[in-house]
Amino acid sequence: MMRFSLALAALSALCRLSHRAAVHGFDLQEAQADATYASYAYCDWEQYEELAWGGKTEGFIVDKVMYEEAHELQGFVGVNPDQKSIIVAFQGTNHARNWITNLYYYKVDYPHCEGCQVHDGFYQGTQAVYDTVYSAVSELKQANPDFEIRVTGHSLGGALALLTSLELANDGFDVVHRSFGAPRTGNEEYAAYADGRLALSLRFTHLSDLVPHVPAVAMGFYHTAEEIWEAGDAYYECDGSGEDPKCSNSVSPFYSVSDHVSISPPPPSPDLKPTSPSHLPTFFLAPLVRLPRHGHHGAAMRDALWYLRSDA
């Protein structure tokens, strides 16, 4: 008989950690919460309002559901009074390998800054649902003026989260953005603009995950800062350039799709199952928390499924 130590046990252990990192806005507990919201975005969009929100999402109330069939986009906007936060979360792709294979590299001009260009598909997707997001966030912020606005997503959802964060910022809101395993979204001018526009923007990368390395720099795409690289044994705060050669870029060319979609989450409730068996951003299951600003980043990376060990 096999006994599995599943994700819930890892989460429980993390909740007992007393150390909380607070370097350049990195807060482990908030990162864990946003990763959880991003994972719940993969559930069937028709069931969002019925979910048993628990753990680090306990107390969350769905206000608006986003669904855009033409671009295969979904997510939710809601409020968590316990966290004093307004949450916007986007689903990533359910078919990571196919999505990566078919990813195209067309850029369009970004209207908010000179010389800025962004990925055409990501931008179109953002615009398709932005009216819904803006309306919901505006109403929730008016009702809760002291609440923080947090926008998050995993994979493709991370790209949508960044673009949506900037749209909200350009409409006068202070926004905290956290993405997990997100692809590059625009050119270097756009990345520099984004870095200076948001109240806080953190981009989490995991082990050898392939997705943060597409589209390629050679195609004129560039990452925003600040990257937090989860290397199996620790979180590393990167150099702030967006393309730190000592963080996730150090694994080149040995990228992995499995590090992007490596574990299934526990279902949000016994009766509701996610739409994909492989989607949970694994970042918030990392066992240690260290953020050395300088120094060697080459610690040996452990198997991404370490927390699914089985015992006979």
Image (cartoon, grey):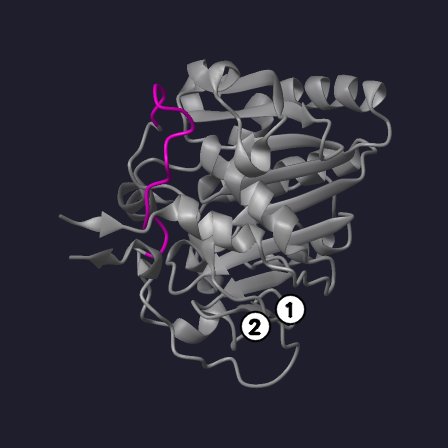
Q: Position of residue 70 (x, y in %)?
A: 42, 20
Q: Is residue 184 above or below residue 23?
A: above
Residue plotted at (76% across, 33% down): 84
Residue under label 1, please give it: 241
In three-dimensional space, the C-alpha distance between marks 1 and 2, rounded to whole angstroms, equals 6 Å
Residue 111 picture location, percent across and down: 70, 38
Three-letter amino acid code at disc 2? Answer: Asp
The segment highlighted magenta reads 259-273
Considering the whole magenta stretch, tell me its main secondary structure.
Answer: loop
- Percent x, y for residue 101? 28, 47
Q: Residue at x 73, y 53 (%)?
A: 193
Name the residue that disc number 2 marks: 244
The label shown at residue 84 is none
Report whether residue 212 is seen.
yes
Residue at position x 31%, y 41% in the image: 278
| Vertical side of 303 occupied by 200: above or below | above
